[in-house]
Image (cartoon, rainbow, N blue to C red):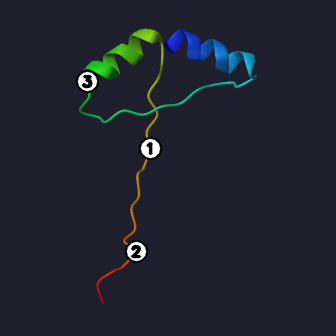
């Protein structure tokens, strides 16, 4: 499946694809690294819609 996605992205002139997995999903991380994917650091932010006064 990942090979097909990569091929489709290439045919659409996309220069990379991105996806995410939780840091605790070690099996997926190992799988993605075996494919040659690299991890990128990221910051995740959240903002309450109704903050307490």
Residue at the spot of label 3: 26
Residues at marks 1 and 2, CA–CA distance in whole angstroms: 23 Å
At x 35%, y 14%, the residue is: 31
Q: Which mark is residue 13?
A: none
- Structural crowding at the residue carrying mark 1, measured as other residues with C-alpha within 10 Å and reported as few (<14), some (14–19) or many (≥20): few
Quadrant that contains the C terminus = bottom left
Q: Report x, y in % for residue 44.
A: 40, 52
- Residue 22 sits in quarter: top left
Residues at marks 2 and 3, CA–CA distance in whole angstroms: 33 Å
Q: Report x, y in % for residue 27.
A: 26, 19
Q: Earlier in the sequence, mark 3 or mark 1?
A: 3
Residues at marks 3 and 1, CA–CA distance in whole angstroms: 17 Å
Tell me: residue 33, above or below residue 44: above
The residue nearer to you, when weighing 39 against 8, is 8
**Helix, strand or loop at disc 3?**
helix
At x 36%, y 79%, the residue is: 50
Tell me: residue 21, above or below residue 50: above
Q: Which mark is residue 42?
A: 1
Q: Nearer the viewer, mark 1 or mark 2?
A: 2
Residue at the spot of label 2: 49
Instruction: Verify CB contact (< 8 Å) between mark 3 and mark 1.
Output: no
Q: Report x, y in % for residue 32.
A: 40, 17
Q: Earlier in the sequence, mark 2 or mark 3?
A: 3
**Helix, strand or loop at disc 2?**
loop
Tell me: residue 17, above or below residue 2: below
Tell me: residue 24, above or below residue 48: above
The residue nearer to you, when weighing 51 against 8, is 8
Q: Nearer the viewer, mark 2 or mark 3?
A: 2
């Amino acid at each position: 499946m990942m090979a097909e996605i990569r091929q489709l992205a290439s045919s659409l002139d996309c220069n990379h694809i991105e996806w995410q997995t939780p840091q605790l999903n070690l099996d997926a991380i190992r799988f993605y690294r075996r494919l040659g994917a690299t991890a990128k650091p990221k910051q995740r932010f959240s903002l309450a819609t109704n903050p307490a006064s």
